[in-house]
Amino acid sequence: MPDADRPQELPARLLTDPEMINACRVRDFGRVFRLVKTRAGIYPSMIARRCELTPSRVGEVIAGRRQLLHMDVVERIADGLRIPGHMLGLARRTWETPQALVVTEREVSQGAEPEQQAPASLPGPDVDSILALTTRTNLSAATLAAFRSSIEDYWRRDDQHGGEALRPAVVGQLRYVAGLLKESRPPAIQNGLYGIAAELARLTGWIYFDARQYNQARAYFTEALQLAKAIDDRQFMANVLACMSLQATYQDKPADSLALVTAAQDQARSAIDTTPRVLSMLSMREAFAHATLGSQTSTHRAITEAHRQFEQIQASDPDPSWVAYFNEPKLIVDTGIAHGRLGEAATAEPLIADALRREAHTNQRGRAFHAFWLARTQLDQGKLDQACHTATQALEPASAVASERVSGHLREFYDQLAPHRQEPVALAFEARLRELLPPVSGSLHP
């Protein structure tokens, strides 16, 4: 980023001011914005632009009519205003002084540790690149099937353990396949390679999305779109746009979410082989977008359409492999979540509970994510004991999967317990949270 485009640093005297420190600690962004305006000359319109918020929302926050609780919004404020992560209970931001450059007492007293060397038996990456140039890979349909099998395995492992450990392998395979695309091959093989590269790019984007690294996720989703467009795979383009729509809801950009899912539906309907399962999934994503916008009528209409399309599914449908996950329990739980996003907790609770009972135990992230939503709907109805019990049950699968998205949701639930923080069930949940998810617990409010 050119220096002229870098966000203006806040004055050191403001960052060390006790009033600013306290406002950040309790995430009183109305006070933070007022201090930034008066002490740093950054006016509300500039705050809105730098934090990717609307000016009206910033005005509502300053006036005390709105609170900002979503973790992604908190991160955007930290990055846009250059507030160090620790002041807001966040991890160190990427623009802060790299940890490697910070001298600690341990480093001073014990000295620098010897640099670890790679095993001498392994050739360097430059040798791999040289050898790759001398070999022309002969691909067949069986080779493409092997690629697809490995992608399916990546998705299974992502559900079980999260994608953090998989990311280097997935990115490496994506770059390898991209290299193969540079060679001339029969159309069927070449098109198959484009499809595989598109799926690997989407998987990489998903891994970054689940880690809440949204800029990287968007870059890989965009690459997946370009690869799918090269072979006119409109169903897959719809799939990628649906992923981007879901990410937009997390980034508190509901209008973007709706625009992206509408584009996804347009792509799907223009394809001659789009199946009812794909259309049902897309209608449910549309429901999420409308619910985030608070539009009850449109949300209910999209839910109805999702169920109507699902009822038309036939066993003989040529469903693409990437939509196989969208089964009946997934339809039901997503229906519940859409109602939950609207604030219709009493309708949402039994749907999510039913789907959670039928969910595969191997899908650790899904179980933790859906248990969070069940707990949230219970809390919204004033069922404190049930909500804390459900959220506590979510902690075990959450601790088994590396997913910042799930951890962030559980922290949101902890924040929502603020009025009940001294109740025994809330204290028990907090203790279990600190025990099982230490990266999250380190940023909990005291």
Image (cartoon, grey):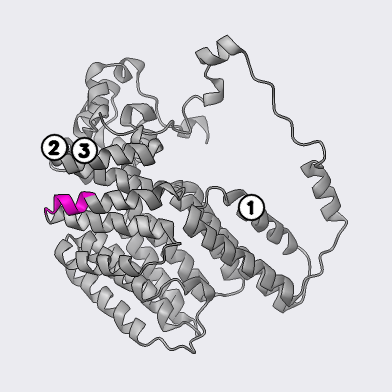
Query: For this rendering, which residue is in front, 126 or 118?
Result: 118
Please give the label number shown on residue 338: none
Does residue 67 appear anywhere in the picture?
no
Q: Are marks 2 and 3 in contact (CB under 8 Å)?
A: no
Q: Residue at x 26, y 65 (%)?
A: 353
Q: Specify the principal SS of the magenta part.
A: helix
Q: Which image quarter: residue 430? A: top left
Please give the label number shown on residue 169: 1
Over which residues does the magenta segment extend? 382-388
Mark whose residue sits in front, 1 or 3: 3
Mark whose residue sits in front, 2 or 3: 3
User: What amino acid is found at the position of numbered circle 3 in the picture?
Assistant: Leu
Q: Residue at x 50, y 75 (%)?
A: 235
Residue, disc 3: 427
Q: Residue at x 56, y 15 (%)?
A: 107
Residue, disc 2: 63
The residue carrying pointer 1 sits among few (fewer than 14), some (14 to 19) or many (20 or more) residues within 10 Å by Cα, namely few
**Where does residue 318 sit, x and y in percent of width and height?**
52, 84
